[in-house]
Image (tube, grey):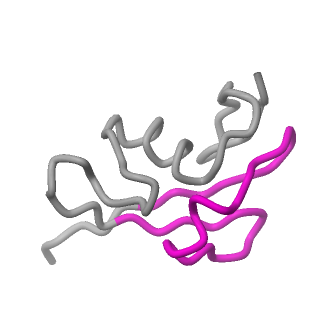
């Protein structure tokens, strides 16, 4: 297991976990390797890894290591 920090909480993820795995863990949704929800719905999530935004096109290729810090934010509609 690898310990990473997601939204100021330590989280255990499997070895060789990627940003896709972290987003799936955080949102509680099953995701494809492209970061799209398996159910076909919208996700509305942005991710920063150690302060740098990670484009969704790179989520599956971005492997996490112990000590990495992620901020995962969800878009909210309204005013």
Magenta part of the chain: 45-73
Where residue 9 sits: x, y (%)?
A: 65, 35
Q: Quadrant of the N terminus?
A: top right
Residue for point 75% across, 48% down: 64
Question: Residue drawn at (15%, 58%), measured in percent from left and top?
Answer: 41
Q: Is residue 75 magenta?
A: no
Q: Residue at x 86, y 42 (%)?
A: 67
Q: Nearer the viewer, residue 73 or 21?
A: 21
- Residue 39 in picture, x, y percent from top left: 16, 47
* Vertical order, 77 against 59 (above or below): below
**Left or right of residue 45: residue 58:** right
Identify which residue is drawn at 55% across, 65% down.
47
Image quarter of residue 8 = top right
- Position of residue 66 measured from the top left corner of the image (x, y, whole percent): 86, 38
How many discs appear? 0
Residue 71 falls within the magenta-colored stretch: yes
Residue 56 shown left or right of residue 53 in the figure? left
**In the shown orientation, is residue 21 left or right of residue 48?**
left
Quarter holding the C terminus is bottom left
């Amino acid at each position: 297991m690898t310990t990473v920090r997601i939204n100021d909480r330590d989280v255990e993820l499997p070895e060789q976990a990627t940003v896709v795995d972290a987003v799936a863990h955080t949102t509680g949704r099953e995701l494809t390797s492209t970061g799209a929800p398996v159910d076909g719905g919208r996700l509305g999530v942005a991710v920063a890894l150690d302060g740098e935004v990670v484009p969704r096109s790179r989520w599956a290729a971005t492997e996490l290591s112990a000590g990495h810090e992620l901020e995962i934010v969800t878009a909210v509609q309204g005013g």
